[in-house]
Amino acid sequence: MNRSRTFSLNAVVKIGILAAFAYILMFVQMPIPIAPPFMKIDLADVPALIGGFAMGPWYGVLIQLIKNLLNLSKTTTGGVGELSNFIVGAVYVYVSASIYKNRKTRKTALFALSLGVVAMTVIATLSNAFVVFPTYAKLMHIDLNAFVGMASKTNGLVKSYFSLMVLSIAPFNIIKGAIASLVTELVYKRVSPIIKNLGRI
C-alpha cells in the first residue's frame, strides 16, 4: 500500500473513532442554572480538540461536522441546534488547534485553548443573538421573549433579550469551553500516543 493511501486510511480511522466518541459524549449532559433549560454542558468538544491538536485544525473541524451530522437523526430543533453547535465548536477547535500546531508545548496549549474559548464565546453570542435564536423561534412559531422567560426562571439577571445573550449565553459558553479545555489539557498527552498509532497498517 502506498504512503499517501495509508495516510488517508489512517486519517479516516482516527476521524471516525474520535467523531464516534464525540457523538456519544453529546448524550452526557449537565444543565447549569445561568442558561435556558435547553442548553446543557457536555464534553463532546474534547475529542474534536484532541483530533485537532494531534492531526491539525481542519481534522478537528471535520470531527465536529460528523458529530453533528450523526446527531441530526435525533434532533429536536429541526437542525438549528446542530448547526449552532457546529459553528461554535468549529471556531473553538480551529482557533485552538491552529495556535497549538505552531509550537506544541503545554504553555502554548493553555494559551491556545484560552483564545479558543474567547473566540467561541464571541461567535456563540453573536450567532445565537442574530441567527440561531431568531431562526429557531420562527421555526417553532414562538416569540423571542419566550427564551428570556425560560432563562429568567433560573437566572434572575436575565431581564431582556440583550441580557439573555450577555448574562446567560456568553457565560454558558465560557464555562462550557473552560471545562472542555481543562479535560483536554488533562488527557491529551495521555491519549495522543494512542491517536498517533490508530489505523496504522
Image (cartoon, grey):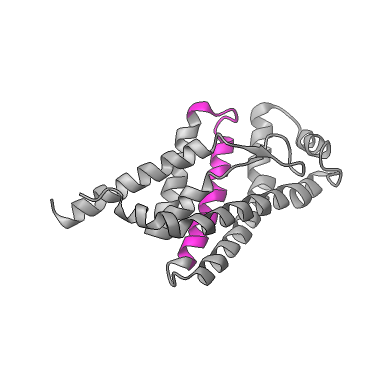
In this picture, residue 158 sits left or right of residue 118: right
Q: Is residue 78 magenta?
A: yes
Relative to 109, residue 42 above or below = above
Per the picture, the main secondary structure of the magenta-coloured stretch is: helix
User: What residue sits 69% from the left and 33% below the top?
Assistant: 137
Q: Is residue 15 magenta?
A: no
In this picture, residue 192 sits left or right of residue 149: left
Point out the residue furthest to the left here. 1
User: What residue sits 47% from the left and 46% below the top?
Assistant: 64
Point out the residue furthest to the front here. 190
Front one among 111 and 120: 111
User: What residue sits 54% from the left and 41% below the top?
Assistant: 83
Residue 116 image offset from top left, x and y in percent: 57, 60
In this picture, residue 5 sits left or right of residue 20: left
Residue 84 image offset from top left, x and y in percent: 58, 43
Residue range in magenta is 73-99
Residue 113 image offset from top left, x and y in percent: 56, 62
Relative to 36, residue 201 above or below = below
User: What residue sits 57% from the left and 50% below the top?
Assistant: 88
Relative to 73, residue 172 above or below = below
Residue 129 image offset from top left, x and y in percent: 69, 47
Q: Is residue 123 visible?
A: no
Q: How many marks?
A: 0
In this picture, residue 4 sits left or right of residue 108: left
Q: Is residue 17 visible?
A: yes
Q: Quadrant of residue 111?
A: bottom right
Front one among 108 and 65: 108
